[in-house]
Image: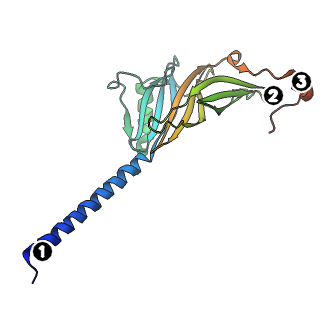
Amino acid sequence: MISPSRHSSSRSTATFAAVLIFAATLLASSVGLAQASKISMTVLGFTEDGKRMLVRMDDNQVGLGLRLYDVETGVPLKPWKKYRLIQFERGHEVATVKAAKRRYKIKDNGVEALKTENEKLAFFGVEKGENLVIAATDYKRLGKLMDVPLKRDPETKKIAQATLRSIFWTTDRKHMVLVVNQKIKGQFLFEKDYFHWFEFKPTKIMWVKPDKKEEEEKEDDSWWPW
């Protein structure tokens, strides 16, 4: 016969074990969420004046959503209550996007390309120190559009890894929105796309002046190996 005290002790032990298992599961779940923070952004079009853009967000923690952004600042329009995040399920995306474009008067679908319209200039990103250099090439020279500052983990102080993921242009090719992906591997993984606006004019490219001796040796040969 089991004594009441021994029965009570066994029940307490079982309860404590169950609590530990629940706590461990909850902790693993929260850690898993922290390690999987990823936000992808895509430009779906611009207003007629090119000052605003409709953005599709894919956040693995929040889900899918649409929001109106200011083109020059690259941040959501305020007040946020008026321009709130429009969440939707994947199966309802087409209808939701169509309604949002009508609501925000998105007239220009824009163009996604890493090259100019005539394909004589191409753009790419190169990490240098604490910046991502947005570079340009005409396949004979190297130039620079701008520097994009890299994020830093506030705790580990590690600098983010960055890539130029895409470029969205207004149809007239006068404005370009660069989508820069930044990834920080600290205590948890954080990855997000950021927007950087540039008013494009070929004269704004800062071309690197070649060394005269090297220029004489290479003559008209392109430095581009592909």
Disc 1 and disc 3 in contact, CB within 8 angstroms? no
Which element carries disc 2, helix, strand or loop? loop
Instruction: Identify the residue at image location x=37%, y=26%.
Output: 83
Mark 3 neighbour class, 10 Å CA radius: few under 14, some 14 to 19, many 20 or more: few
In the image: residue 213, left or right of residue 21 = right
Which element carries disc 1, helix, strand or loop? helix
From the image, tell me which residue sits under label 2. Answer: 140
Upstream in the sequence, badge 1 or badge 3?
Answer: 1
Separation (CA) of disc 2 from disc 3 = 16 Å
Rendered location of residue 162, percent (x, y):
58, 36
Kindly identify the amino acid type of the residue bearing the numbered disc 2: Lys
Kindly identify the amino acid type of the residue bearing the numbered disc 3: Lys
Separation (CA) of disc 1 from disc 2 = 84 Å
Rendered location of residue 21, percent (x, y):
29, 62
- Tell which of 18 and 69 is nearer to you: 18
Separation (CA) of disc 1 from disc 3 = 92 Å
Q: Residue furthest bottom?
A: 1
Q: Which of label 1 and label 2 is nearer to you?
A: 1
From the image, tell me which residue sits under label 1. Answer: 7
In the image: residue 80, left or right of residue 37 = left
Instruction: Inspect this view and state whether residue 113 appears.
Output: no
Coloured how? rainbow
Residue 75 placement: quadrant: top left
Q: Which mark is residue 178?
A: none
Q: Residue furthest left?
A: 4
Would you place residue 87 above or below residue 72 in this image? below
Instruction: Inspect this view and state whether residue 14 appears.
Output: yes
From the image, tell me which residue sits under label 3. Answer: 213
Kindly identify the amino acid type of the residue bearing the numbered disc 1: His
Mark 1 neighbour class, 10 Å CA radius: few under 14, some 14 to 19, many 20 or more: few
